Image (cartoon, helix red, strand yellow):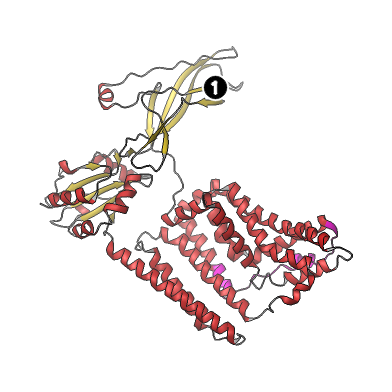
Amino acid sequence: NLGEIKYPPAKEAKFSFSEGLLSVFEGKIVVKASAEITPTVALGKQVLRGSFSFQACNDVNCFAPQTLNFEIPFFVSDKKAAAVEVKKVEATPEEKKSGDAIVAAEIVKQEQPENAIEFTSDELRAKRVLEKGLPYAILAFFIFGLAINLTPCVYPVIPLTVGYFGGQSGRSKGSSFVMALFYVVGIAIVFAALGLISGLAGKQWGFLFQSPWFVIAVTVIILAMAASMFGAFEITIPAWLSSSLGKSREGNIGALIMGLTVGIVITPCAAGIIIGLVGLVAKLGIVAKGTLLFFIMGLGLGLPYLFLATFSGLINKLPQSGMWMVWVKQLFGVLLIGVALYFFLPQAKHVPNMSNFFFGLLAIFGGLLLGFLDHSPGYTKKFKIGRAIFGILVIILGIVLVNSGLKEKEAGIDWIHYEQGTVEQLAAPDKPVFLDFYAEWCAPCKEMDRVTFSDDAVIEKAQNFTMIKIDCTKPSEKVKKFMDQWNVTGMPTFIFINPRGEEVKELRAIGFVPPEKFLPMMDKAAQ
């Protein structure tokens, strides 16, 4: 059993690619750890196997993260403690020259780091909101909870709630409020359990999002929920659960149990709305915050019941159910299609990276449907005017997004994303070639995309090149061989190949290159 691992004090350093100080180690360091031999270990010669991960950086760029496996032979005697002998490995002349770190154990094999969950740029923004922008996330989930009350499946619970509390005779307003609070907390507990399960599942389930087939399955489920919002089929309260609502339970504990029951009843009704949020929390694996956010969503859902239970007469103030509730369902249907796009687009490798374009098309469709296309009887004149205004605003938003997506595609560099093959197979005849070896963890790579590769002059010159991007975040065997072929060790690495198929070695660069320096390099490579 391995005990506590003790690292030496780290140094706080500011790098050109970091926003704040980073904790780093320099030079040779010693990491200590204690180990205890368990009774099940056989006597005699044994081998302790382990691994450690590291990433080497300078002020400009970083090497790829690496995981090194090691083996330490030791001998187990019949004494309680066993001595561990470490064979020190001396540096080779090449290692001394390059300044590579020397490991105080014999290195057996070098491997790439274990798989990590990948996130698209849109998902990273959502991740940052959920992990850092907690107040905004709390507000959003609270509003989602309130909105669930507008679905027709949930709406009948309101008079049942009022009927339950109306039967608790002889209580003051204060006592009724406390009882209603227990009721709402019961609902919130059910939703918190959803968040907890999603967050815990994310520790393992999140890796399933690496599989395109799993993401497609999730997308199909979400689209099915969207279809239910458009009336393809109905999700109703199960009869056995609905009947349990009529059973009278007195006192605060009884109200809590009723709240738990209502929460369970509402969950299938709200499945279409919450399934996307459950999937996102599962993918992010945020256990504590996922539980909190779903608890907040439950409180948002239960807020109207808090007041209705305390002031039962408010039931007469509620709007009557009608066509407006069908419109709300259609709104949720459009939103669910958006969630399906959110999950599916990153898997569509051959679809242009224009998320704004596709979400814009959805907004235009939603604006037309919600504002103008539904001619069912039952809508009031005021509601028709309101939905038309809403539809126009959504259509305008959609047009802006579509235009933004098209400009994004037109203005960007037309990259070829390397999967396999050789440069000769990918390059156009008599055209210079540019190779960009990048990784998602590489800050200078992102700076290149944001600054240099978005520069108008660079984009214009790039039309005369075959521009190839090689993703080294989690390289396949073919990508590893391609990296070895071009002797790539750090990210980002830029390689120019002239029209004759020869590398222009003096133009090879590692790290961020601003546009004013990159443009002359392109000119020289084109000669």
What span is colored magenta in the figure?
224-251
Name the kind of residue labelled 1 in the image: Ala
> Relative to residue 459, is residue 386 drawn left or right?
right
Question: Of all residues shown, which one is farthest toward the right?
Answer: 170
Q: Residue at x 46, y 61 (%)?
A: 342
Residue 418 visible, this orientation: no
Q: Nearer the viewer, residue 394 or 66?
A: 394
How far from the left and from the top, in percent, is residue 495? 21, 45
- Verify whether residue 103 appears in magenta: no
- 58 vs 457: above or below: above
Classify residue 507 by image quadrant.
top left
Label 1 residue SS: strand
Q: Which image quadrant for residue 358?
A: bottom left
At 54% across and 56% down in the image, what residue appears? 136
Where residue 472 appears, x then y in whole percent?
34, 45
60 and 526: which is toward the camera: 60
Quadrant (top left/top right/bottom left/bottom right) for the N terminus: top right
Residue for badge 1: 35
**Rendered image quadrant of residue 443:** top left
| Residue 232 in magenta stretch | yes
